[in-house]
Structure formats: structure tokens, C-alpha cells
Amino acid sequence: MDKISVIVSCYNEEKALPLFYEEMERVRKQDFENIAEFEYIFVNDGSKDNTLNEIKELRQNDSKVRYISFSRNFGKEAAMLAGLEASTGNLVTLMDADLQDPPALLKQMYDAIKNEGYDTVGTRRVTRKGEPPIRSFFARMFYKIINKMSSIEMVDGARDYRLMKRKVVDAIISLKEYNRYSKGLFSFVGFDTKWIEYENVERVAGETKWSFWKLFKYALEGITAFSTTPLILSSLIGLIFCIVAFVAIIFIIVKTLIFGDPTSGWPSLACIIVFVSGIQLFTIGIIGQYLSKTYLEVKKRPIYIVKETEKE
């Protein structure tokens, strides 16, 4: 029999966890009885509520449930990596506890791997119903921008929810970078991938942990992790302004020699200085983003720290 490891990242999900477990068990008994055995790996990412207690209660009633609890909040990327490293199944799936990743799709994903020869099956939302319009707009723009900048294709609407063979999981685990952007890492490792589309599903309980600011920082993480185009862009902007400044200097000199016009006008000069200074700070900021990522990488700090597991 196949063994499917279900990895669930949890941050303040005490209300959603019982509903998620109930739905997963329904799907397991309905679609995978005598086909595959399951293990559930819940990763408690420093939750402030009773998430860990809910997980422990599930563990007491079901030996298939395993858990990893972090010493603090390290973020979803760290939680997914911890789950992947702890998984033992020959097939592995990543899911959210809020049921926005429909468990009912798992059988379709499983069949695509077993019967159609795919190495991994991913999911993507075809609608963003329920999201604020401004958030949906920026999300679409992000995918357009990053696909133009990066040599790796990022699928618009792609979720972390996917079913992978063990060789795909091992390839992802082998990427030990500190600054992780999983959607990019999934694309980077390649393998034959099938995409399943579905309508957006709203959270079953609790509130989203992704504010606009967090999503913005996550988008920057993706751009700097998989593209050096911003560095090229900053160099190009600097070159353009050098050329413009040189032409302006020649124009002023020629105009003064021919027409005798004085080079006056401090307000316009002040505006030009402020504008050019802003461009300089912008490009320095881009370089600073890459330097900061390098700084974090070379320190070799652990991506996460485990406080306890079901074995302790």
C-alpha cells in the first residue's frame, strides 16, 4: 500500500483543526480505504492559542497523528520544511488547516500520479472570490511581474496544496537555503506536474494570518529569491540618468556660450537633486535587499527550532 503524509502548517488554528481532521478522515475512509495508509503531521508554528492542545488531543485518539511544535513562530515556509523533513510516506501533500485546500481533491491528485505518470500534482485557484479586490489585483500583478523577471515559471493562483512523489520531496529538502519561497522552489526542482483548477474556498473557521503587508514582504522574497532583474534594472536606471545629466550639461554649456543665458533657477535645481537622490536611494534599496538575503544565508542559522514532538 502507498503511504500518504499529510503536512499541515498550523498557526492559531484551534477552531479549524477539529473540522479539518473530521473532513480528512471522511475523505480517507471514502476514497483511500484499502488503497493507502495515512499519517498526519501537524506543525505548530508557535501558536498563541490552544492549537497545540488540540493537536495533542487528536494524537491521543489517533496514532496516525504526529506533530512538531516550534519554540516560536518561524513562519509557514519553515513549518512546511519541517513537515517535509519529518514525512515518511512515499507520497506527500501540503495542506492548510482552514480547509481552503479541499481534501476532496486528494483522490483526483492521487489518480493523476498513479495512472497518468505525473511526479507531482498541484492546485491553482481560478477565482479569488471572497478576497478584497485590491489584494486580488496586486496578486495578479505580482505573478505577471515575476514571470517576466524570472526564468522559472510561477503559476498564477498556485497553492502550496500539492501531492508529490518522494523523489520530488527529497529534491525540495535538498535545497537548504534560509530565505525560502516554496512556490519558486517547487518550480525550480521541475518534474512532470499536472495542475488541477478549483474555485476559491473561504476559511472554515478563524481569520487569515496574511495581512497585505505580510503578502507584500512575501512577494519581495519571491522576486529576490528567483530573479536578479531588479539589480539589472537599478543599473539601467543609473545609466539612463547619467546619460540624461551629461546631455543636460552639454545643452546648458552650449546655450550659455551662444545666447549668453545665465544658469539660474535654484527651485528647478533643487527638484532635480531631490528626484535624482530618490532614484539613488531606490536603487541602493534594491541592492540592500540582496545583501540582506546574503547576510542571512551566510550566518547559517537554523530555519526552525523544535520544542517538542509526539515522541517527547
Image: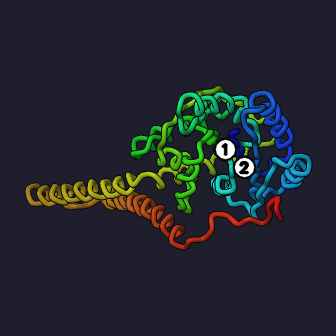
In this view, the residue farthest toward the bottom is 299
The residue that disc 1 covers is 94
At 82% from the left and 40% from the top, the residue drawn is 21
Residue 142 as seen in the image, left or right of residue 214: left
Q: Quadrant of residue 198?
A: top right
Closer to the camera, 155 or 252? 155
At 24% from the left and 54% from the top, the residue drawn is 244
Mark 1 lies on a secondary structure that is: strand
At 82% from the left and 41% from the top, the residue drawn is 16
Q: Nearer the viewer, mark 1 or mark 2?
A: 1
Q: Could you tell me residue 133's position as x and y percent? A: 62, 32
Q: Would you call the spot at circle 2 few (<14 residues within 10 Å), some (14-19), or many (20 or more)?
A: many
Does the rendering let one see residue 168?
yes
Q: Could you tell me residue 72's position as x and y percent? A: 75, 64
Distance between the Cα atoms at labels 1 and 2? 8 Å
Q: Which mark is residue 130?
A: none
Residue 285 as seen in the image, left or right of residue 166: left
Mark 2 lies on a secondary structure that is: strand
On-image quarter of the N terminus: top right
Marks 1/2 in contact by CB < 8 Å: the verdict is yes
Closer to the camera, 306 or 76? 306
| Mark earlier in primary sequence (1, 2) | 2
Q: Amino acid at mark 1?
A: Leu
Q: Could you tell me residue 204's position as x and y percent? A: 80, 35
The residue that disc 2 covers is 9
Asked if residue 178 is positioned above or below residue 38 in the image, the reply reads below
